[in-house]
Image (cartoon, rainbow, N blue to C red):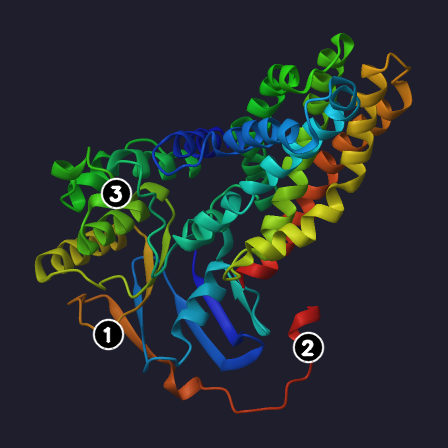
Amino acid sequence: MDLVASDLTVARGGVPVLEGVGFTLSPGRALVLRGPNGSGKTTLLRTVAGLQPPVAGEIIGAGERIAYAAHADGLKAMLSVVENLSFWAAVFGTQGIDDALSAFNLEELAGRAAGTLSAGQKRRLGLARLMVTGRPVWVLDEPTVSLDAASVALFAEAVRAHLGQGGAALMATHIDLGLAEAEILDVTGFRAKPRARAEDEAFL
Amino acid sequence: MRALLLRDLVLAVRAGGGFGLGLAFFLIVTVLVPFGVGPETGLLTRIAPGILWIGALLACLLSLDRILALDWEDGSLDLLATAPLPLEAIVSVKALAHWITTGLPLVLAAPVLGVLLSLPGPGYLWVFVSLALGTPALSVIGTFGAALTVGLKRGGLLMSLLVLPLYVPTLIFGAEVARRGTEGLSVQSPLLMLAGISFGVIAALPFASAAVLRVNLR
C-alpha cells in the first residue's frame, strides 16, 4: 500500500510553512526530504505521522502504519536499554527485541540504564525502537544526528533491510546514506507564501 | 496498556521517580497542624477530618506535574500518541498509575495519621472510605490539568491554579463524609455525591484530557 500525500499544506504555530506538497511513497522505497533549517521538514513529518492535522490536502495510507522517530528519542533514563525496548515492543504488540539490539550493536549495552549512555548510543537505541514497532512506514526526523560513521552505516543497513522487507521510509536528513532506493524531495520549492492569518489558533 | 502502567510504576519507584514524596508531604502537614493550632484535643478532633482531606489533596497536587511533563520532555508522549493505544487510554492509565503511587498510599496512611490529630473512633473508617472514594477523582482531574499545561515551561503553578478550583466539589463532599461519619451522623447523601463525582470524572474526563493533549501536541 502506498503512502500518498496530495496538495498538502502544513502549518507551524498557525502559520503555513509548506503548501502544495505531494508525493507517493511505495513499499520498498525511501524518500529523503531536503531543505534548509526552518523550511518545514519537521512540520511535514509530524503531519504525516498524525501528530497534527494538515491545513489542507490529504494523506492516504498513514495512521496506524507509521513509526515515527523525532529529535527526542523517548527514552527513560532510569530504565535499562532492554527495558526501554521491551516497553515499546509491548506497546506496539510485537515480540522479540533481539533483532533490534543486534542491528544497532546494542547487545553489550543491554543492561545499562539509558541515562548513562552517550548521545550516539541513545540515538542508536531510539532508532532500534523503530524495528520493534513492526510498522511498515518509518518517518524519521534527522535520524543520524550524533551518530558516528560506523553507526550511520549500521542505520543505513537497517533501513535497507527494512525496505527489502517491503517497508518504506520517509526521512529528513542532510547527509547521504548511500541508499540506492532513495528519492530526493526538496521542500524549498513548496514554501508557503506569506498570508494574513485567517483564524485565531488559540481557539482551534 | 499494562506495559504502560508497569513502566510508570517502575519509573515512580526508581531513583528520582518521586514515589513517597506526596506521602512524606502529607505526613509533615499532619504533624505541623497540631503545632499550629495548639494541642487542645477537642479542637483537633473537630478539624481532623478536614485537615486530613486538605493534606491529602495538597499532597496529590504536588506530584501532578510529573504525570505528563516528563514524558513530554523526553519525547515519549509524541511516540505514545503515534502508538496503537488511543490517547484516552493513555491518559486513563497515567491517572491510574498516579493514583496507585500517590493516592493509594495517602488512603492507607490517613487513618494512621489520624492518631496525631486525635481523630475519634468512628472517624478512622470514614476518613479511609471517603479518601478511597475521592482520591481517584483527584488523580483523574489532575491528569486533565496536566494535559492542559503540558509543554508549558514552569507550567506547574498554572496547573495548580487550574486544578484546585476543580477539586472543590470532591473536597466538599469528601470532607463532609469524613466529618459526618466522625460525628456519627448519616453519611448517605454526601457519600453518594462523592461516588457520583468520582465515577463521573473517571468516565468523562479522559476524553477531555485526550482532546486537549491532541491540541497541545500539535
Q: Quadrant of the C terminus of chain B?
A: bottom right
Q: Amino acid at mark 1?
A: His
Check if mark 3's residue and mark 1's residue have beta carbons within 8 Å.
Answer: no
Q: Nearer the viewer, residue A192 or A168?
A: A192
Q: Is residue B61 above or below residue B96?
A: below
Of residues A182 and B145, the one drawn nearer to the viewer in this rendering = B145
Is any atom of residue A181 visible in this view?
A: yes
- Position of residue B70 measured from the top left corner of the image (x, y, whole percent): 44, 48
Q: Is residue A136 above or below residue A101?
A: below
Give the SS element for disc 3. Answer: helix
Q: Which label is found at residue A174?
A: 1
Classify residue B34 by image quadrant: top right
Q: Nearer the viewer, mark 3 or mark 1?
A: 3
Q: In which quadrant of the rendered view does residue B3 lie?
A: top left
Q: Is residue A38 left or right of residue B48?
A: left
Inspect the image, locate mark 2, and give the three-letter code of the amino acid beneath it. Answer: Asp
- Which chain letter matches label 2? A
Q: Who comes first in sequence, dot 3 or dot 2?
A: 3
Dot in front, 1 or 2: 2
N-terminal of the pair, mark 1 or mark 2, is 1
Where is B144 relative to B200, above or below? below
User: Where residue A118 sits in the image (x, y, percent)?
Assistant: 18, 52
Image mark for residue A200: 2
Q: Callout 1: helix, strand or loop?
A: loop
> Relative to residue B105, is residue A151 drawn left or right?
left
Give the labeled residue for mark 3. A114
